[in-house]
Image (cartoon, rainbow, N blue to C red):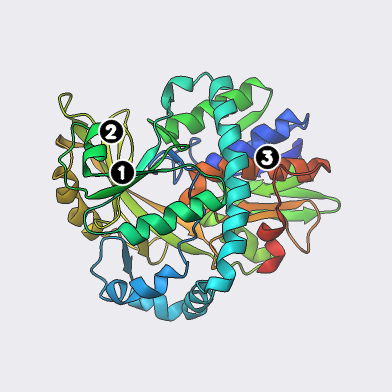
Amino acid sequence: MMEDKADVVVLGAGIVGVSTAYAARQRGMSVVLIDRREPGSETSYGNAGIISSGSITPLNNPSLWKALPKYLTNRHAALRWNPLWALQNAGWVARFLADSVASRFRPRAAALHGLIGASAKLHREWIVKADAAQRIRETGWLKAWRGEAVAAVKAEQALLAEYGIASEWLDRQAISALEPDIVPVYKIGLLHTETASVDSPGAVVKAYTRMFAEAGGDVRQSEIKAILPDGDRWRVVLADGDMSARHVAVALGPWSADILRPLGYRVPLAFERGYHREFKPNAARSLRRPIYDIDGGFIMTPMEQGIRVTSGVELTDRDAPSSFAQLDQVVPLARGVVEFGDPVGDAWRGSRPTLPDSLPMIGPAPRHAGLWLAFGNQHIGFTTGPATGAAIAAMISGASPPFDVAPFAPGRYI
C-alpha cells in the first residue's frame, strides 16, 4: 500500500508545522504537510498575534513563588487550575515548580532569547515573501499596570536590557499619548518597542502555507492515525491511505504526545488552555497595539474582525469541557479600558502545549532515526514558530540551526 513518498512529512499545520515544511522545502527537499484541519485553524488561530521580542521569561520563574498564594485561591483571572488534574499530574507540577528556582532561570531565558531573535527575523522576512506584509504592525506592545509597580517595571526593563532588548518606561501621561483613545486606568507601563503584532495570526499561517505550496510543497488534509518505523524510512498511516517518508517531523502541538506514545515515548506535556472573544470595534475609540493588562490578567489586541480579548492560563485536561469563567471575568475589565461593541462570533478555546521547563522540544527523537520533534512552544508559539521550523529543517539537512538548540533537545525528557 506504499503509494506516496517524500523526503519529509510534517505532521501538524499550525505555525510550527507550516514553518518546518516551508524551511525544509527551501532546502530542496520534497515535503508533504498534513493536518486533519485547514492550516492555522487550531492553537495558531486563537492567540494574540504578537511577535514578542521580550518574551524571554518562562511562566515558571522565581516570581511565581510570590504569586502562588493568590493563584492557589483559584479565582485569579491570570491562572485557573483543576485540582483533580493537579493531583493526577503531580509529577509534572513538581517539575514545573522545581524549574522556578533562580538558578534555572537565566539559562532558560538565554535559550528563549536565541530562539525568539531568530524567529522574529524570519517572521519579518516571510511575511513579506508571503504577500501578507499589510498584516504586520511595528507598533510594539504595551505591558501596563493599574497599581504601583515601579519595582516590577524596573526589574523587567533591566532584564530586557541585559539581553539587548529595547523598552520604554511610560507614566500615565505617556500611556495616554501613546493610546489616546483608551481610558487612563494605568499608572505605569513598559512598551516593548521591538515587538510586532499581526491582525490575524490564522491568516498569517495560511499565507505561509500558500508560500510553501507555491514553492512546490504538498498540503494535505487527512486524519493522522499513526507513524510506524519501516526499515530506514517511516510509514505515515492516514485515514485515506499511507505515505512513506525518509523523515517525519511531529509538530502536532497539544496532540504530539499521543502520536508518540505507541513508539515508547512518554512526553510530560501539559496544556495551557486559553480563551478569547472578539468584539466589534468602535471606530472613534481605536486600540493601536496589543495591551497586556498585568493586574487584570488579560490581553486586548486589535484584530481584523475587531478587538480580541484573551484570557489567562487554565491548567486542566486538554479536552475538558470549556469554562468561560476567566473570560467572563476579564471582558468587563477590558470594556473599562477601550470601548467596543457586541461580540463577533463565539468564544474560542485552545490548548497551548507546555513542558515542565517551559522550553519546547526541538530536535531528533532519541531512539528513532529520522523522527523529529517540534512542539511544546507554550504561550509563545506564534512568536517562535518560524525558527523552530528552520532549526528542524537545518538539522534534517545536516546544517547548523540558526540558534543554539541544545537547551531544547528532546532527550532531556524522553
Tag 2's secondary structure?
helix
Q: Which residue is mark 3?
A: 390
Q: Is residue 86 above or below residue 367?
A: below
Number of residues whose C-alpha sits closer than 10 Å to that of mark 1, classed few (under 14), some (14–19) or many (20 or more) = many
Q: Is residue 127 left or right of residue 42?
A: right
In the rendered image, residue 31, in percent from the top left (x then y), is placed at 71, 34
Nearer the observer: mark 2 or 1; the answer is 1
Using the rendered view, name the quadrant where residue 240 is placed: top right
Tag 1's secondary structure?
strand
How many angstroms separate mark 3 from mark 1 (CA)?
A: 36 Å
- Amino acid tagged 1: Leu
Q: Earlier in the sequence, mark 3 or mark 1?
A: 1
Residue 12 is labelled as: none
Q: Earlier in the sequence, mark 3 or mark 2?
A: 2
Using the rendered view, name the quadrant where residue 412 is placed: bottom right
Q: Which residue is mark 1?
A: 170
Q: Is residue 90 above or below residue 263?
A: below
Quarter of the image with the N terminus is top right
- Amino acid tagged 3: Ala
Q: Is residue 329 left or right of residue 239?
A: left
- Amino acid tagged 2: Leu
